[in-house]
Image: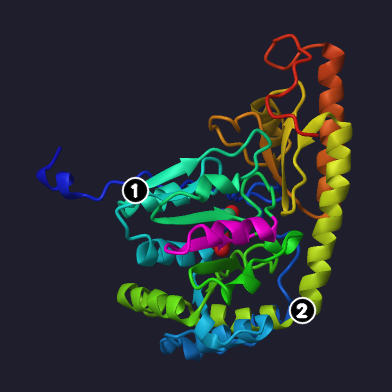
Amino acid sequence: MSGWEAYVRKVVPYVPGEQPGQQGVIKLNTNENPYPPAPGAARVLREFDADSLRLYPEPDCGTLVRAIAEYYGLSPEQVFVGVGSDDVLAMIFLTFFNSEKPICFPDITYSFYDVWADMLRIPYRTKALDASFRIRKEDYYGESGGVIFPNPNAPTGELMELPEIADILAHNRDVIVVVDEAYIDFGGESALPLIGEYDNLLVVQTFSKSRSMAGMRIGYAMGNAKLIRYLNDVKYSFNSYTMNRTALACGVEAIRDKAYFEETRNRIIATREWTKGELKKLGFSFGDSKSNFIFAAHKTVPAQEIFDALRREQIYVRHFNKERIDNYLRISIGTQAEMETLIAFLGSYLTALSEDGQSSDGHCETEQEPENNRE
Ligand code: PMP
């Protein structure tokens, strides 16, 4: 080992889902939206004045901040924007999780939290979800350096109701509580109305899922003006020009087009509910996801086998090789047609397996229920 290597900040990085390059793939592995962004965003790109790229973008992201504030009925001082909610969350970790006491988050959750904590040397403690993969609010009552959880949680899709979140806030008055609402638009109730009552609450959302703009990288945090000021101080100390000109202009169009947002969001919800019914008929079990994905286990066939079979068909879903969840697949909701293709394939694949009486690795099928059979 060279001498300098002792001084490297060594990290185990987050591993994002695969982005297969080839055409014709059904991509249900990274919770993207299958529909295009709002037409106004495409128009901005078509008409974009490339000459303006000579100039730095607005450091305060003012046009986009104002548009988001207007949409939610907030003042611009209550909104912070960043390069996807990953950037926003990283800034939040850096700014607010600065205590000797460990921050708390669920054991099964967004797998970036422990990566940021490790990178920034933030102590943390994970709290086990219950047997139905639900967050137990009581686990977050004790002293800590802060609390963060997604709602709905990822990758489970389980939603917490607002009174439970208010209860966690009431028990954590002296630390920052972050509710990561990447998937809230697909059927949950946002904690945003609580920011007036709790000056320690940050609600984080993204344009990547319900607004079909994962490729543009826009995320935002909402909270009281003091929190947002602290967040901006750290952001300006790190990189003052985070958002590029095209992202700012497209973001404004996307947030203003409420009708398009509602139409595509409702289509995804309808397809999700249809997919739940079909998966159930095929012997899958899952919680009542309120997100744009379903986290499902099959009653007899191991997740890894189904994952491999789907991949051979060019259908990509996500499988986490992690304790407690390694028999589950996280299936993002695509278009209705994509989900019909998925279900048709699973139907014939599972039928062929049961006719063989064996799973594909040669083991005899057993009638054992999966450990977490909740339906
Ligand atoms: N939070 C959660 C729970 C997520 O699943 C994701 C998506 N990977 C993000 C935040 C980050 O999304 P983005 O950076 O695209 O806004």
Q: Where is residue 2 in the image (x, y as percent from the top left)?
A: 13, 41
Name the spot of residue 319 as percent of width and height, x first.
61, 36
What secondary structure is found at the residue carrying circle 2? helix
Quadrant for ligand 1?
Answer: bottom right
x and y percentages locating residue 81 in the rendered image: 51, 76
* Disc 1 CB within 8 Å of nearest ligand 1 atom: no
- Please state which amino acid type lies under the numbered disc 2: Lys
- Front residue of 349 and 85: 85
79 and 328: which is toward the camera: 79
User: What residue appears at the point 77 percent right and 45 percent down from the top-left corner?
Assistant: 288
Q: Nearer the viewer, mark 2 or mark 1?
A: 1
Residue type at numbered disc 1: Pro
- Quarter of the image where the N terminus is located: top left
In x, y percent, where is residue 44?
Answer: 65, 84
Looking at the rendering, the stretch of residues picked out in magenta corresponds to: 161-182
Mark 2 highlights which residue? 258
The quadrant in which residue 257 appears is bottom right
Between 101 and 189, the residue placed more toward the observer is 101
Q: Badge 1 is on which residue?
A: 123
Residue under the point 13% across and 48% down: 4
Q: In this view, does 221 lie to the left or right of 209?
A: left
User: Would you say the residues marked 2 and 1 are in contact, meaning their CB atoms lie under 8 Å apart?
Assistant: no
Residue drawn at 42 percent across, 85 percent down: 59
Q: Is residue 328 above or below residue 164?
A: above
Note whether residue 65 is visible: yes
Distance from Cα at disc 2 to Cα at disc 1: 40 Å
* 10 Å crowding of disc 1: few (<14), some (14-19), many (20+): some
> Is disc 1 placed on a helix, strand or loop?
loop
